[in-house]
Image (cartoon, grey):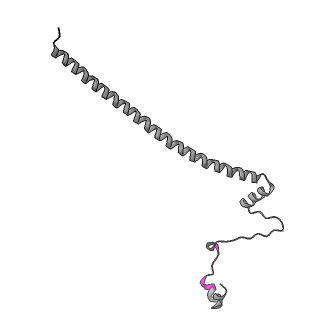
């Protein structure tokens, strides 16, 4: 026969072992839940990024379709060719507009030849 003291000690040990086992299981459950939560947050961020990219690409597609539709007409083809190559039809005049940096400036020697008249003709 087993004494009462031994029974209590076995019961107490089993109770503590059960509590420790439940604690370990709870920690594993919390770790798994936290991992799923992190993956869910990452998936939500990727989804919003994909939605934004989709919107940008939809806008770009509409722009490209408009350009493509414009290139389907003779006037659109002519506009595109004229923008890429310096072509002029017979009888047309070509005007070239220069930026301020591209305009040749008069040197000091040329100004002195005209004297004070050069300040009038600037």
Looking at the image, residue 69 sits to the left or right of residue 98; the answer is right
Residue 29, how many percent across, how many down?
Answer: 37, 30
Residue 85, how many percent across, how many down?
Answer: 73, 60
Give me the residue at 43% from left, 39% from top: 38
Residue 65, how many percent across, how many down?
Answer: 71, 49
Relative to 19, say whether 65 is above or below: below
Residue found farthest to the bottom = 116
Relative to 41, say whether 88 is above or below: below
Looking at the image, residue 111 sits to the left or right of residue 13; the answer is right
Query: Residue 74 occupies which quadrant of the picture?
Result: bottom right
**Magenta-drawn segment:** 102-110
Q: Along the line of sight, which residue is nearer the eye, 7 or 57? A: 7
Query: Residue 33 occupies which quadrant of the picture?
Result: top left
Is 1 included in the stretch rendered in magenta?
A: no
Looking at the image, residue 103 sits to the left or right of residue 2; the answer is right
Give me the residue at 74% from left, 71% from top: 95
Residue 102, how many percent across, how many down?
Answer: 63, 72
Q: Along the line of sight, which residue is nearer the eye, 72 or 109? A: 72
């Amino acid at each position: 026969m087993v004494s009462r003291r031994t029974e209590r000690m076995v019961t107490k040990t089993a109770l503590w072992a059960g509590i420790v086992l439940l604690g370990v299981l709870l920690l594993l459950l919390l770790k798994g839940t936290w991992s799923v939560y992190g993956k869910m947050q990452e998936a939500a961020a990727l989804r919003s990024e994909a939605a934004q990219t989709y919107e940008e690409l939809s806008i770009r597609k509409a722009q490209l379709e408009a350009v493509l539709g414009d290139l389907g007409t003779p006037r659109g083809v002519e506009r595109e060719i004229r923008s890429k190559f310096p072509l002029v039809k017979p009888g047309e005049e070509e005007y070239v507009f220069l930026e301020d940096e591209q305009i040749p400036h008069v040197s000091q020697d040329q100004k002195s030849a005209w004297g004070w008249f050069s300040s009038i003709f600037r």
